[in-house]
Amino acid sequence: MSQYKVRNWSQYNEFLKKRGSLSLWISEDAIEKWQSPKDPHFIGAPQQYSDDAILCLMALKVVYHLPYRQLIGFVGSIFALMKIALKVPHFTTVGVRAKLLGKHFKKLSKVRPTDLVFDSSGFKIYGEGEWKVRQHGKQKRRRWRKFHIGICPRTQEVIVAEVTGLESADCEIGPKLLKKAPRSVKKAIGDGAYDTWTCYRTAHDKGQKLIVPPREGAIFHEGDEPWLIARNDAICQIIGLGNDEEAIALWKKLVGYNKRSLVETSFSRYKGIFGPKLFSRSFDNQHVELMLKTQVLNKMTAVGMPDGIMT
């Protein structure tokens, strides 16, 4: 039985320790941009703190799981130890300004991948904990948000993302992820939920090859549309390999579909670091929270990842 073995344990241990370093989140650049620059064209009372300052505070909040009031005390004590004469905003200011940060997450990563692997997962936003539900039953309606992401399988950084309600199907959001993908992407990989003509058409229009396992009972479609070719080829290849479960498993290996498991690993890493729940109440704040955590996760990933091999 094959096993996964990490070949750079000593380096990876240093990477993990560096992720918790305060210097990673409060850099000299963040301190220099703490005060909001004066804008002569701005109407109204000028903002005292820059967006960079609010982003820095929110990053500390999600990394160290701090409530707003404790966050302010935490940053204030750091500035005192560093002997920096900077004011810390009031916790209500941080909460109000946080929901306006959405414009900063249009580009989550600078990586220009050739492959994109996408999937979705749910995050709790309201409801009793698992223990209470088990002991006393569900008393309130439990609510969720659905987070759709596309990652680079080489660096495992999140490249594109969308936040929706739980009722949004993956096949509806898949085309949006494909449209937002960088031009460098030539291959997109997803599970059977993305086996729709809209996904294939969008991938073709973007110059991408969509690798999705055809659904059970899928048939060859006649037509001149170019986006039919990829799906028809997949069906023919599976039939040629035997048209059974072993044939599908072999087809997945031949086309590189097994890279898709990396996006599930990313969600596991995401929830392991930040938890499966959201602390924000409104949709705009939840969107900012998920995107901020994604950007922080990318920063952690860029610090260093394990180098593994199957033995």
Image (cartoon, rainbow, N blue to C red):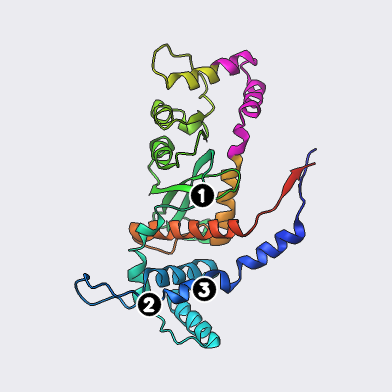
Identify the magenta region.
236-260
* Amino acid at circle 1: Val
Which residue is rendered at x = 50% and y = 80% of the image? 74
As drawn, 162 above or below 207: below
Residue 4 falls inside the magenta stretch: no
Residue 245 falls inside the magenta stretch: yes
Image quadrant for the N terminus? top right
Query: Is residue 51 rendered to the left or right of residue 30?
Result: left
Distance between the alpha carbons at the discs numbered 2 and 1: 30 Å
Give whichever of discs 2 and 3 has the lower sequence position.
Answer: 3
Magenta: main secondary structure: helix
Query: Is residue 311 rendered to the left or right of residue 307?
Result: right
* Amino acid at circle 3: Ile
Residue 29 % position (x, y)? 48, 72
Which residue is rendered at x = 77% and y = 51% of the image? 7
Q: Which residue is mark 3?
A: 26
Q: In the rendered picture of this protein, how many numbered marks are placed on residues?
A: 3
Q: Is the residue marked by circle 2 packed among few (<14), some (14-19), or many (20+) residues within 10 Å?
A: some
Q: Which residue is mark 1?
A: 158
* 26 and 60: which is toward the camera: 26
Residues at marks 1 and 3 touching, judged by CB atoms closer than 8 Å: no
Q: Which residue is mark 2?
A: 35
Residues at marks 2 and 1 touching, judged by CB atoms closer than 8 Å: no
Query: Is residue 41 rendered to the left or right of residue 223?
Result: left
The quarter of the picture where residue 204 lies is: top left
Q: Secondary structure at mark 1?
A: strand
Res. 43 in view: yes
As drawn, 222 above or below 195: above
